[in-house]
Amino acid sequence: MTPLVHSTSSKWYCEGRQASYVQVRKSPGGLLDLVELARPAGDMSRPAQPDLVLHEDLLGGSRIHGDSGGGSFDVKSTKGDLGLDAPDFAHTMMMDTSHRVRALSFCLAQWKNVYEEATDGRGSLERIRLYRGPFRSIAIQSVLRNLWALSEEEGAPSRLLARAAGCEILAELFRLSGASFTPARGGLTPWAERRCLDLMHARFSEDVSLDELAAEARLSPFHFARMFKQSVGMPPRMYLTRLRMEKARELLELTDLPITRIALEVGYSSNQVLARVFLKHQRISPSDYRRAVRDPARSIATR
């Protein structure tokens, strides 16, 4: 019987023999695919696929024997270990205990221009020296933790969040492999900053992408993300969230729209998502905020 062939790693995880192990999947339109799996001991080998796959061991304590594209290794894992599977390589993996991992797949067709721009054309996936077994990176662990937390908060990560997180991770992978980067050339020019901010104000309720913002500034996504932060003082995604919170507060204060409608008006998929984000940033729920601004005396009295 001919085995099923899956065009991407995420399809293999979610549609192949691993499907029953998938606990959570979050995917933002093909830019990144996040999957959390709880798997038993045994053979976890994977056929060759065109994605670059980064995974994090959430438990540790397993003996791992395999080859991810950089030669065979045999190690004892620890919690927080990272692993990188080379694209177009049939990787082998044997685990002696049950384990829990989060896998992040890069669809390389969506990322080629980013890593070429980041290294001025000198970086290639073949030059990444991290296919040789588990490695550690506080920077990548932090990005993964934030990406997962924001995905839990808002649902599938936005294109803006996914692209920014992917840029950070790829930059760190190349840095750990010895690649040099062209330094950021200061902040955005005044005209570029104005055009980007105007676009974000006009489309704050949409899933605007980092690529669209970068195009307004006539920059690559990789350089734009760093230069925007230098100019504005925060990453593009954080600025967009601030715009959404400002509009949500305005609608809560000045209208009688249901909170579900307000959530949609400011770009969130449900009132539950708005409530989570609003509580995180405003330290109060949307309904309590509305009561407080409509009737401050009552709000103080009931505290």
Image: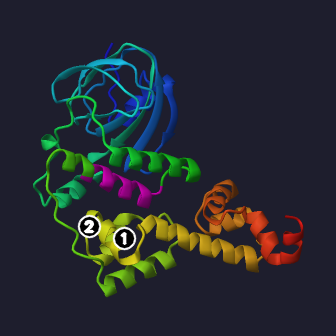
Return the residue found at the far left.
Answer: 122
Q: Hey, what amino acid is under mark 2?
A: His
Q: Can the viewer see residue 295 in this picture?
A: no
Q: How far apart are marks 2 and 1 (CA)?
A: 10 Å
Q: Give the range drawn in magenta.
A: 158-171
10 Å crowding of disc 2: few (<14), some (14-19), many (20+):
many
Which residue does the image show at 44% across and 78% down from the upper left?
199
Instruction: Indicate which disc, 2 or 1, sits on the residue closer to the N terminus.
Output: 2
Q: Does the magenta stretch include residue 64?
A: no
Per the image, the residue denoted by label 1 is 229
Q: Can the viewer see residue 73 in this picture?
A: yes
Q: Nearer the viewer, mark 2 or mark 1?
A: 1
Mark 2 secondary-structure assignment: helix
Which residue does the image show at 48% across and 71% down from the upper left?
239
10 Å crowding of disc 1: few (<14), some (14-19), many (20+):
some
Mark 1 secondary-structure assignment: helix
Q: In this picture, is 233 found above or below 132?
A: below
Image-based side of 125 in relation to 233, left or right? left
Any mark on residue 149, and which?
none
Per the image, the residue denoted by label 2 is 223
Which residue does the image show at 33% across and 66% down from the upper left?
225
